[in-house]
Image (cartoon, rainbow, N blue to C red):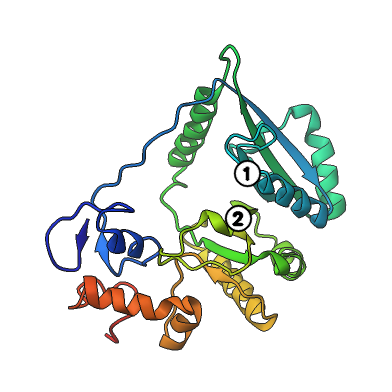
Amino acid sequence: MYAGEGPLLTCTAKNNSELFHAVLGGLGQFGIITRARIPPEPAPQRVKWVRMLYSDFSAFTGDQERLISINGRKDDKAVDYVEGSLLMGWLENWRSSFFHPANYSIIISLITTHGIIYSLEVVKYYNDQTRFTIDEELQLMLKGEEELRSQGLWEVPHPWLNLFIPKSQIENFNEGVFRNIVLIRNITSGLVLVYPMNRNKWDDMMSAVIPYEDVFYTVGFLRASGFDNWEAFDDQNSEILKFCDEARIEVKQYLPHYTTKEDRMKHFGPKWKTFVERKSMFDPKSILSPGQRIFNSN
């Protein structure tokens, strides 16, 4: 990694620790990562994958929270993967292929009746004679990319919005955003993910900011637009953030972009002081400032 000035450094949680944690959620203000090493884990021999559909949001979130509360690696009752998403229309993407064709009409009927169906995916690893189909799943994902590229739909704007929502306010977010903004606007291209995480899995030394509650939700609006209609997606993102502000939902954006110092200080909260100190430490000449315009006014 290159810091704002100085030699190429190798950083880990123990070596050059301050810089290592600063760049995680640091909005490019402290250094440029030139290479990253992510050690893989052994692939499981077998996997059980289940997808469940809910019309009741409280039941959906309650089951997710119960699943992540059993999170010990050696706990036989723990699951290995939990993810939630919204179904608001029948999307011809790589995920829809996981449904058996015999269930298509049932799923469409549920969406028609309830407007939104909440989908919960759960994965459990186990050992047996290997028949795991991970290669097939990866090929399916790559096929989806190839199809989008062939249609000229891969290199298009992606007006994504990624949010962290406190557990105590996720019900209000569902009513105000999912049902009264997203459903009404009916922009169905792309994915909307929603799933909980445990705060104790995050390191407070990181620059990334998350809610203060022990459990919080990640909500990802992973949209892909055309070059002529991205404004509709951008407008929806703005409406979502405006609702959260007016409803006093203490949302935190992942990789936020703010235009005023006051908004940045509000976002970082108690971490703002550390953020500024790290800037002076690793990029004193503000070489890396222009992109986000946090530490310069030009």
Residue 280: give x, y in percent of width and height.
Answer: 24, 78
- Residue 198: image tag: 2
Location of the C terminus (image quadrant):
bottom left
The front one of 236 and 218 is: 218
Circle 1 residue: 71
- Identify whether 198 is placed above or below 76: below
Horizontal side of residue 15 vs 201, given as left or right: left
Question: Which residue is painted at 64% across and 35% down in the image?
Answer: 75
**Residue type at the position of mark 2:** Asn
Question: Which residue is painted at 64% across and 34% down in the image?
Answer: 123
Q: Is disc 1 in contact with disc 2, using a CB cutoff of under 8 Å?
A: yes
Question: Which residue is painted at 85% across and 44% down in the image?
Answer: 109
Local crowd at mark 1 within 10 Å, few (<14), some, or many (≥20)? some
Residue 59: give x, y in percent of width and height.
Answer: 82, 52
Q: Which image quadrant for residue 131?
A: top right
Whether residue 133 is visible: yes
Horizontal side of residue 36 vs 283, given as left or right: right
Compare marks 1 and 2 and give the one earlier in the sequence.
1
Considering every residue shown, the one lying at the far top of the view is 129
**Residue type at the position of mark 1:** Asn
